[in-house]
Amino acid sequence: MSNSLNRRKFITGTAVATIGAISLPQIVSAAFEAEKTPKVTLNANDVIVYQGDSITDWGRNKSETTPNSFGMLGTGYVYQSAAHLLLKHADKNLQIYNRGVGGNKVYQLADRWDADCLAFKPNVLSIMVGVNDYWHTLSGNYKGTIETYRTDYKKLLDRTKQALPNVKLIIGEPFAIKDVKAVTDKWYPAFDEYRQAAREIATQYDAIFLPYQKLFDEALKVAPGTYWTNDGVHPSVAGAALMAKAWLKAVKS
């Protein structure tokens, strides 16, 4: 074997070892260090609904109606976290649905909320939305503002709480990884307002808040942004695994 090939193998092996040296639980723990995160207790026959945009959707079969199925769950963080829940809580008969739709902003969630959320009568509702509410303004095709986002989100949760007063809410923070394709300096500081709004709304509605931006910021200490995301917004396989690990942090084991 040539010296150059040996060197390449050494460098590759070192990079893999570096990634492996800090485990997913350690990254997640660091992200949650400043959070006082309560935990959801799952009960027998609970219905869990994941809602959001393409980050949640992630290739699900929209004609699939069977809970807990590959087609229903897609291939992203929803699938990975749901698989863990179904394995760990096999005795609880959980019913898990992914109803994310690519490209959605909050008002588009509202347009389909009765059929795609309330009709399932979820005991646990996870919402991850906000990146499109900002991103789509950059093209000039959407005129929403941070106030639009905040107002629409609160109206959606008011409506949800009225129909499902005992629902347990989990709100995911909108996140972006700078300098990876779509995400440039142009995003800041405006996008940070959407992150802050999501946090404030989670507090106001007694929802568990998942600090996804901090999560990926911690992950960048281990591997570059292109390892965790495809375009600065949509997670890679590793990024989806990271999100799933963080989501599961909200559930009592």
Image: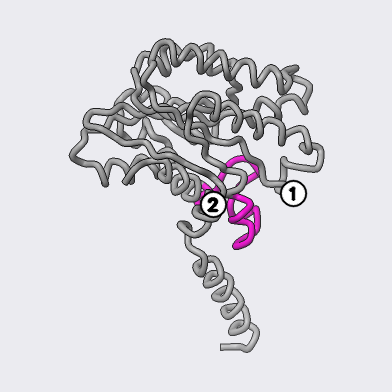
Q: Nearer the viewer, mark 1 or mark 2?
A: 2
Report x, y in % for residue 103. 60, 26
Q: CA distance from mark 1 to mark 2?
A: 26 Å
Single out the residue that lies furthest toward the right: 186
Q: Residue at x 54, y 55 (%)?
A: 30
Pointer 2: residues within 10 angstroms few (<14), some, or many (20+)? Answer: few
Query: Which secondary structure, mark 1?
Result: loop
User: Which label is found at residue 179?
Assistant: 1
Question: Would residue 76 be seen by someone viewing this image from the given angle?
Answer: no
Question: Would residue 179 be seen by someone viewing this image from the given angle?
Answer: yes
Query: Which secondary structure, mark 2?
Result: loop
Report x, y in % for residue 228. 58, 52
**Could you tell me which quadrant the N terminus lies in?**
bottom right
The picture quadrant where one finds residue 244 is top left
User: Which label is found at residue 33?
Assistant: 2
**As drawn, 64 above or below 178:** above
Pointer 1: residues within 10 angstroms few (<14), some, or many (20+)? Answer: few
Callout 1, which amino acid? Asp
Tell me which colouring the rendered structure shows.
Answer: one colour
237, 77: nearer the viewer: 77
Q: Residue at x 68, y 17 (%)?
A: 148
Q: Residue at x 47, y 46 (%)?
A: 246
Mark 1 vs mark 2: which is more N-terminal? 2
Report x, y in % for residue 75. 44, 41
Magenta stretch in the rendered image: 216-239
